[in-house]
Amino acid sequence: MSKRFIIAGGGTGGHIFPAIAIAQAIRKMMPLAEFLFVGAKGKMEMEKVPQSGFKIVGLDIAGFNRKEWFKNILLPYQLMKSFLQVRRIVHEFKPDAVIGVGGYSTYPVLRWAQFKNIPTFIHEANAFAGKSNQLLAKKALKIFTGTSGMERFFPAQKTIVTGNPVRQSIAHLSVDRAEALAGFGLEAHQTTLLIIGGSLGAVSINRAVAAGINRLQSYGIQLIWQTGKPFINEAKSVCSGLKGVWVNDFIQDMHLAYAAADLLVSRAGAMSVAEIALAGKPAIFIPYPFAAEDHQTSNALHLVNRDAALLIPDREAAQKLIDQVIALAGDHDKRSTMKNNLLALAVKDADEHIAKEIIKQIGS
């Protein structure tokens, strides 16, 4: 008899890609399993999940807005509406288990599943647990975490440190650097900087790079620059006529970008941190300052405290980022030490670990 799974969450690549990785791992072990993803309407999961071959339905829900408080006035109504939608989805799909990966849709879906006594599982990618997951953990069967020390947020007897599931193409990176660089139209003999401000872009990083791009080029540093949609037109204008720059709003083949890079500038979302560790690429993290409980700083410090990465606060990016990139690009010993420390922290099989535990708990 096949099992049916609902996987809830999304909002950013940091929630979507682990969700897909977990579903793919379960499918390998249970080929007849059926999956339904539940996300938030208008968010990137509504595009990325179908591209991976899975069905998704969207809820009318938004998250708590920490910057513009007045936008939260409709939140109670949206939450109530989402619960009604979830009730219908669960009733029609009849899941054997529900898995939450974080994001707007996780809370109403798992809360309703728990009310109906359906087994629930949580994956917490960040080094600082979100409030919703802390509440949901009380009735969850198991909580999978990306880092150790999460017993301060979750019941210790339910918590398993698995690491964070990453895309298979990155977990098993096998592309030659020169080949990857050629795909971006860049030279193999130059130092390559990869800039990834998250799937939606990062204003502070983009502005610092735009202001300092000529300095970077004067030091022989070429760029692979993912800007996010809001900054792409400005970035293309800045890069007009320049050689040694590949710029786009989104990098579809992220494994090629990691293979091509010598060093990175990145936000510190949990999945970016996990992927960078697996790729073994020295990074300068600029955590998003408005992340809940400042969890991106916690994520970055997991590597920084082990001499595996550097950190610049968002407010200091304009003044310090370019100097730091140039210094790191020129310090081969530092980069070598960081690479070795990163690879020692990397986890390749988190998706399989999670899938095996879920199947064990619900039975095959």
Image (cartoon, rainbow, N blue to C red):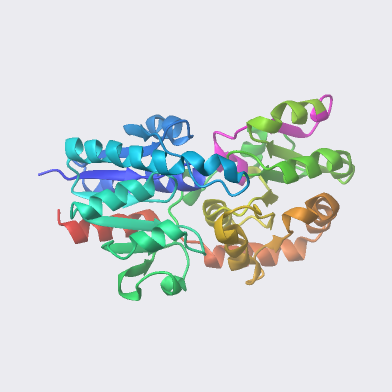
Q: From where the camera sits, is residue 51 visible?
A: yes
Residue 67 in the image: state x and y as whole percent: 63, 47
> Is 59 situated left or right of 234 in this image?
left
> Is 345 situated left or right of 297 in this image?
left
Measuring 44% from the left and 33% from the top, which residue is drawn there?
A: 48
Q: Is residue 247 magenta?
A: yes
185 relative to 341, above or below: above
Measuring 42% from the left and 48% from the top, which residue is drawn there?
A: 18
On-image quarter of the N terminus: top left
Measuring 74% from the left and 45% from the top, which residue is drawn there?
A: 204
The front one of 17 and 86 is 86
Residue 20 in the image: state x and y as whole percent: 38, 43
The front one of 329 and 100 is 100
Q: Quadrant of residue 197?
A: top right
> Is 102 situated left or right of 116 in this image?
right
Q: From where the camera sits, is residue 167 visible?
A: no
Residue 249 in the image: state x and y as whole percent: 64, 31
Q: Is residue 241 magenta?
A: yes
**Which region shows up in magenta?**
238-258
Measuring 41% from the left and 74% from the top, which residue is drawn there?
A: 151
94 relative to 130, above or below: above
Q: Quadrant of residue 277?
A: bottom right
